């Protein structure tokens, strides 16, 4: 019924293989999700090659609804608490699962601070259009069709559009998009280990991102994922390098813990010998890693749009530099205990090993002890992560909260950290970043280009690759 109302004529990507015979390969690849106000004769999107050829002739007019974007506002915590957008189930139209969602605005605006949980706030799904620009957004499948309706791709269609644009990026000599999306990141994955049979959702999320660049684009959280995470396509390998280095060393350390023969040193490691205790600590550690990665991804549209629209703000430079250091370079482990600012000594080289030590001993262990201060940045989120892990491991985190157990666990983990440091000396000495007094990167794997500037440069490259 909604399809009738919107009068959509959508690309059917499963027909791609038949199109070169018509000499339309490039035209098809670059085409946009058009619609026409002339009512189609059928109640479903056009599926014939002739319907597709006709859709190519529809101009992208200046009066198109997608150009009528709301004034950008990125302060999502001040948005109304009531949900503003309803999303349909994915409507599948392609043979490989390609499809789209219909988003319906049910509030006065597209903006909402409503959420199914603390971490899934809806925010504003039109941010992706404001960030990319209407034509590039429409190429990927994001388009406002009428004042109250918007379409968005499902993960399969989004991936297909990424594959298509990568051909054009390669022709232009630009870096290809490495991001991939999935409807679900399974929370139960078999593992070839006698010590551990299942991964938590947080561990699956981190490992899927690290090994195959896949992130969730979930039907149950689609409005949130569109608003906060669709812009992952703008992150270059250079900008992602510090995050991937941090995650890589964390995974290596966890694997080292799991593979270590604690049974041979049970008197020295009585807590870590206990599989339940060890896995509870690892589970909470992956929750923090997932939050770190999610914060980086989720802040991309906000900071990119702040850069474009809010250059007059007095805290503009500070906000962007906090984003650069906190999420892109060094991670939230470098946040001071009682404020969102940083414990960063300028002209010091911050290594991967330095980060891992901070992540474990000043970020993870205080959380296990439950001594986080309420003034700490994202205190509520951290407490929720602790609760999730405690429930997942049947109260083991609460048991380890005991002062004696926590102190002994810290001692055992310190010994393991030193052993790991010797084993991975080269990797641990990798410099994430070194800053001068003006916060400029002067060495390390962190790119000297500000991540927000890089994001907006990337928007330009994607548009240019398609000739927009």
Image (cartoon, rainbow, N blue to C red):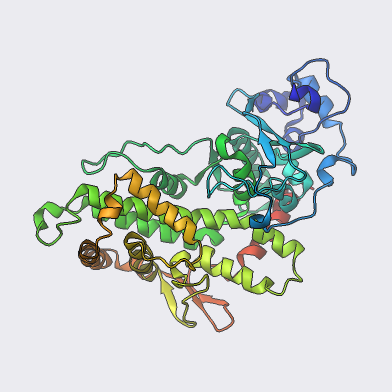
Is residue 331 at all visible to an observer of this figure? Answer: no
Is 417 situated above or below 131?
Answer: below
Q: Is 272 left or right of 186, judged from the image as shown?
A: left
The x, y position of residue 423, in whole percent, is 25, 64
- Taking the view exactly as shown, the residue that stands out farthest to the top is 41
Please tell me how many numbered marks the rendered image carries. 0
Question: Which residue is painted at 67% across and 48% down in the image?
Answer: 112
Which of the image's four quarters has the N terminus?
top right
The x, y position of residue 124, in whole percent, is 69, 48
Which residue is nearer to you in this view: 429 or 328?
328
Question: Which residue is painted at 79% across and 15% down in the image?
Answer: 42
Q: In which quarter of the image is residue 394?
A: top left
Is 216 situated above or below 235?
Answer: above
Which residue is nearer to you in this view: 431 or 121?
121
The x, y position of residue 400, in whole percent, is 25, 57
Q: Is 320 left or right of 132, judged from the image as shown?
A: left
The x, y position of residue 154, in whole percent, is 62, 34
Is residue 361 at all visible to an observer of this figure? Answer: yes
Q: Is 411 left or right of 187, judged from the image as shown?
A: left
Question: Which residue is painted at 76% across and 28% down in the image?
Answer: 23
Which residue is nearer to you in this view: 103 or 58?
103
């Amino acid at each position: 019924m909604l399809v009738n109302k919107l009068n959509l004529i959508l690309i059917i990507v499963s027909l791609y293989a038949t199109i070169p015979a018509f000499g339309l390969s490039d035209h098809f690849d670059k085409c946009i999700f058009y619609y026409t106000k002339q009512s189609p004769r059928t109640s479903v999107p056009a599926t014939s090659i002739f319907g597709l050829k006709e859709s190519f002739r529809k101009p992208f007019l200046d009066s198109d609804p997608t150009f009528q974007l709301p004034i950008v506002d990125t302060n999502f915590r001040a948005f109304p608490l009531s949900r503003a957008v309803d999303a349909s189930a994915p409507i599948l139209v392609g043979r490989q699962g390609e499809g789209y969602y219909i988003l319906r605005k049910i509030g006065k605006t597209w903006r909402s601070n409503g959420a199914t949980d603390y971490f899934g706030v809806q925010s504003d799904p039109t941010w992706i259009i404001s960030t990319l620009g209407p034509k590039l957004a429409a190429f990927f499948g994001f388009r406002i069709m009428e004042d109250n309706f918007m379409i968005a791709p499902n993960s399969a269609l989004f991936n297909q559009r990424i594959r298509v644009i990568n051909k054009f990026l390669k022709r232009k000599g630009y870096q290809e998009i490495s991001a991939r999306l999935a409807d679900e990141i399974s929370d139960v994955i078999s593992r070839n280990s006698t010590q551990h049979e299942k991964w938590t959702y947080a561990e699956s999320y981190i490992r899927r991102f690290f090994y195959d660049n896949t992130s969730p684009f979930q039907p149950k959280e689609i409005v949130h994922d569109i608003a906060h995470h669709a812009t992952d396509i703008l992150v270059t390998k250079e900008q992602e390098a510090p995050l991937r280095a941090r995650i890589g060393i964390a995974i290596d350390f966890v694997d080292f813990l799991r593979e270590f023969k604690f049974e041979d040193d049970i008197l020295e490691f009585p807590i870590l010998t206990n599989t339940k205790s060890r896995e509870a600590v690892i589970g909470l550690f992956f929750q923090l890693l997932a939050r770190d990665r999610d914060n980086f991804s989720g802040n991309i549209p906000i900071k990119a749009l702040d850069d474009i629209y809010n250059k007059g703000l007095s805290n503009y430079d500070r906000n962007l530099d906090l984003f650069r250091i906190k999420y892109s370079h060094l991670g939230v482990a470098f946040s001071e205990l009682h404020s969102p600012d940083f414990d960063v000594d300028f002209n010091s080289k911050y290594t991967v090993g330095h980060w891992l030590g901070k992540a474990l001993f000043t970020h993870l262990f205080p959380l296990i002890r439950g001594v986080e201060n309420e003034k700490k940045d994202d205190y509520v989120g951290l407490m929720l992560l602790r609760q999730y892990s405690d429930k997942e491991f049947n109260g083991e985190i609460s048991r380890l909260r005991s002062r004696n157990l926590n102190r002994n666990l810290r001692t055992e983990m310190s010994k393991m950290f030193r052993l790991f440091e010797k084993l991975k000396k080269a990797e641990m000495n990798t410099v994430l970043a070194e800053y001068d007094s003006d916060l400029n990167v002067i060495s390390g794997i962190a790119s000297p280009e500000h991540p927000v500037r890089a994001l907006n440069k990337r928007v330009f490259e994607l548009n240019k690759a398609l000739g927009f």
